[in-house]
Image (cartoon, rainbow, N blue to C red):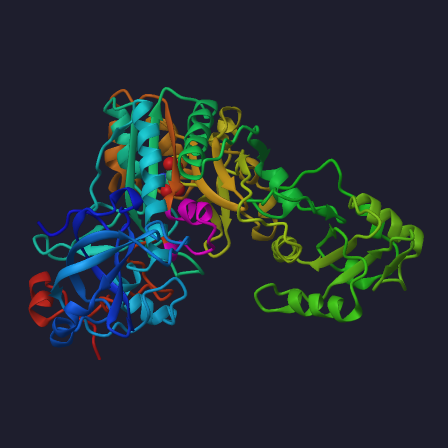
Amino acid sequence: MYRTNTCGELRMTDVSKEVTLAGWVQTIRKFGAITFVDLRDRYGITQLLFGEQLNKELEENPPGREFVLQVTGVVSERSNKNPNLSTGDIEINVHSFKILNKSAVPPFTIQDDTDGGDDLRMKYRFLDLRRNAVKKNMELRYAVNRAARNYLHQHGFMDIETPFLIKSTPEGARDFVVPSRMNPGQFYALPQSPQTFKQLLMVSGYDRYYQVVKCFRDEDLRADRQPEFTQIDCEMSFVEQEDIIDMFEGMVKHIFKEVKGIDYTAKVERMTWEEAMWNYGNDKPDIRFGMQLLNLKKPSSVYTSKKDQPGLINGAGFKVFDDAETVLAIAVPGCSEYSRKQTDELTEWVKRPQIGMKGLVFIKCNADGSYKSSADKFYNEEKLKAIAIAANAKAGDLLLVLAGVEERTRKAISELRLEMAERLGLRKANEFKLLWVLDFPLFEYDEEGNRWVARHHPFTSPKPEQIATMINNNPVIDNAADYLKHPYANIKANAYDIVLNGNEIGGGSIRIYQRELQERMFAALGMDKEEQQHKFGFLLGAFEYGAPPHGGIAFGFDRLCAILGGSESIRDFIAFPKNNAGRDVMLDAPSSIDKKQWEELQIKPNLK
Ligand code: ASP
């Protein structure tokens, strides 16, 4: 037997038992004739005491850091107890030991505060995973996985695996492709998600499906994306949007309870996509704090609002506002006393290329009721006050105003809002706020192709009352500049996202389940009959054999874990992640393949 106990297990109640432990050497300390070793395994650390009688043996066979050691000895009470360690009251008085395996000197210390940089840790990820900080993340990931599975099992969901070597499933990204040796010149695609399979399973009658599943998307990796990532993918039959919301709100709350011990009893807020865009400038707002946007110009037709305030800035001759497509403001609480240096710094912040604004206008709502602005020349105090009131600013607040083209300005102000909240400590890692964003647009305008693309994916159903708009209007966009006037721009989908602290953690939709409507949808996306048949013949065919009404959702499992673990980075919650260039630096993948492999695949390498 290699061990009788783990290194995290022994307590005072075990004193005087003889035990055998096995693990890795964390530290070795010599005090005169005595040697202390901290032995580590997945469960914890136990102190070992090697007395004088073992000195000779230790000298002949000295263990080093990360050696795999097996010891037998007696559990004893420690004279110098360590309250920070669960085993800190005891130590093992070793009477024999064996080195099970040696270790090279690790390239970084296996500690919470390691001296290893990111690249080094990724190269030696198997050592990094030994660190407690990383192990905790893996444990949390498993806890989330378990909680989700338990909940779904309790609710009658069945885990059904779907294939990885498939034909492309469009989710808006590029496919990874795999050449088929047996079918020269032909390729499989790796699934961007199991979307079409889970819909086929509904046709097959498996009315509650789930899978914790890998998805593959060949995207240029923006910060904190992985080319392969994991979804908790779910689908249900005979459901409406409300049923899905109910079921999966329940799942997230169950996960909160199981993993974090949090009773999420508050009602989960809901807003429409338009409200989100209007009030927060993006479709996944962090609603742990206010600072809602004030729109000072009439917006484009997609955004509607009851509280737009176009009059407030008109007629002052301020070119920055007059010439801008969009003028947006936020009231930052308690910052009216910002110094010149601070407002200058903020101006620089919005001018950074990632934000891309030309400048920043501010209005200080002073505690004494007066107003001061960088646009004083154009707006008298009365006007400044009116703007401040419209933005919900209170005495002591700082109003920040951005002006420019619609999309960029909206994006910029929503970034600025998050930045200010971060600076003010309003984005607390241990505060969780869920939100459903509903009624997404069905289509998105693709500038490059001057055409419509599916905002979620082409299987999402339009709002029933807007089906006629889709069917009765030609999808062709005659005037690209005026695409917002096209009837398609206003068609809403039965699609929903669930947002946690400003992150989309899940999204889904009620699906189209009739062949004719699905064909209309494909046609609206510019696919002719032949292409439809080639790409989705299997699905259209299946819809002819009694497809039930159905809908579903998929959760970004890695992201959910990262948020629950209080981290910004999903990489910390993936055992073997890739870097920002999509490389696995440990495996050194992707890599070239040898000549024989090329030949077997009958593909010619395009090498210079
Ligand atoms: N397959 C979708 C996605 O990956 C989710 C869904 O519609 O269920 O975003």
Q: Who's the residue at 38% across and 55% down the image?
A: 81
Asked whether, in this view, residue 346 is left or right of residue 69, the answer is right
Q: Is residue 522 visible?
A: no
Location of ligand 1 given as a quarter of the image: top left
* 538 to 559, vertically: above or below: above
Q: Residue furthest bottom?
A: 608
* 103 to 490, vertically: above or below: below
Q: Is residue 482 magenta?
A: no
Q: Position of residue 407 (x, y in %)?
A: 61, 54
Q: Quadrant of the C terminus?
A: bottom left
Q: Position of residue 481 (x, y in %)?
A: 60, 53
Q: Is residue 480 visible?
A: yes
Q: Position of residue 199 (x, y in %)?
A: 30, 31
Q: Who's the residue at 15% across and 76% down the image?
A: 59
Q: Position of residue 426 (x, y in %)?
A: 63, 50
Span highlighted in magenta in the image: 558-572
Q: Who's the residue at 90% across and 51% down the image?
A: 383
**Quadrant of residue 110 in the image?**
bottom left
**Quadrant of residue 306 in the image?**
top right
Asked whether, in this view, residue 601 is left or right of residue 173, the answer is left
Between 295 and 333, which is closer to the camera in this rendering? 333
